Image (cartoon, rainbow, N blue to C red):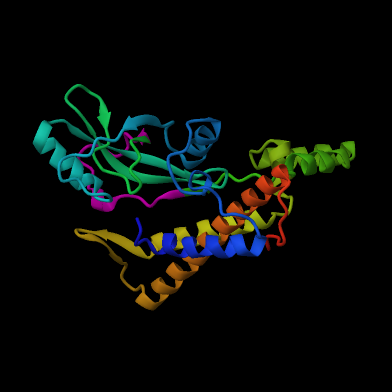
Amino acid sequence: MSDDPFRLKMQKARVMLSEHLGLPMLAEDLQLRETVPLLDQTVFDFCRAAGIERPTPVNVTPADGAEPGWCIRNVRRAIEQRGGTVVHGWLTWGAPGLFYEAEFHAVLRDLEGHLVDVTPTQDGETLVLFSPDASYPESFDFMQRPANKRIKIYRRPDLDARIAERLASMSEASLRYEGERARRKGMQLRDWVASRIDPDAFDVAIDRFISLADKLDTMIEPVTDGVALRKGVRSADFDRIKEELLAAKLKVWMMAEGAVMQRIAATSGAPSHGSMKTA
């Protein structure tokens, strides 16, 4: 939406980024955005890590009078209009290559047994990925809904090479020792070694964004007409975290789009006179 503070700031940031790098701004279809990801192995891995079922593609067919962000109200209205039942579960959203997010949600199961998302999305998507969650029955009080789940999916480009280098440098005794440590952690040796490699700038930036987003979630609670600050949370603290989150998200987006712009320039032979500061 045009009045979204992040989008307004990102529009200005894209101009500054283009001027800094001396490169044209990305075409709109190449600009980074949070949307419905492709249903691939990264989504399945995310769902397993988040503790939710593999998602099912569900059509978005807004009910009459439905509003974005008010799923349970929209589903109840749809039931009154056409019958059916409510199904609780999780929507999977994502910023490609960076992170995925599971958002607690409600959809309609129509009289023919089909799942339909009757809530319009902010960006007009016509298909969403939905994971039904049987642990939240039809009678579940949506006001008690759980917080969103966010997990980084970014993988630094040189990670496999660094893992191979680290493993190759180990003696047989070290491999046995590290293998045992990995086993005690319930991890494969390669994953254990990867976890001990220093993060790069993208890792740090995405981790900070997720940490702040999770922190902000703990400061609010659902109420009848939206959300409100939890008891004991000061509005000044909430506003500070909100601003830090906005800045952290802008940094991730700027880094990602700047990297794409430079990659396009490198393959096309276009010159640039700047570089991304990723730390």
Q: Is residue 186 left or right of residue 60?
A: right
Q: Position of residue 154 (x, y in %)?
A: 60, 46
Q: Is residue 214 left or right of residue 3?
A: right
Q: Is residue 278 visible?
A: no
Q: Which residues are magenta?
A: 129-149
Q: Nearer the viewer, residue 145 or 14?
A: 14
The total of numbered circles placed on residues is 0
Q: Position of residue 22 (x, y in %)?
A: 66, 60
Q: Position of residue 8 (x, y in %)?
A: 42, 63
Quadrant (top left/top right/bottom left/bottom right) for the C terminus: bottom right
Q: Residue at x 66, y 38 (%)?
A: 187
Q: Residue at x 57, y 43 (%)?
A: 97
* Residue 135 counted in the magenta span: yes
Q: Residue at x 77, y 41 (%)?
A: 163
Q: Nearer the viewer, residue 50 or 94?
A: 94
Asked where in the image residue 235 lies, by quadrant, the reply is: bottom left
Asked where in the image residue 164 lies, by quadrant, the reply is: top right
Extreme-left residue of the structure: 80
Q: Residue at x 88, y 42 (%)?
A: 169
Main secondary structure found in the magenta portion: loop
Q: Is residue 2 visible?
A: yes
* Residue 218 counted in the magenta span: no
Above or below, 7 against 37 in this view is below
Q: Is residue 238 left or right of residue 162?
A: left
Q: Nearer the viewer, residue 259 or 87?
A: 259
Above or below, 232 against 207 in this view is below
Quadrant (top left/top right/bottom left/bottom right) for the N terminus: bottom left
Q: Position of residue 174 (x, y in %)?
A: 85, 42
Above or below, 234 against 29 in this view is below
Above or below, 94 against 172 in this view is below
Extreme-top residue of the structure: 112
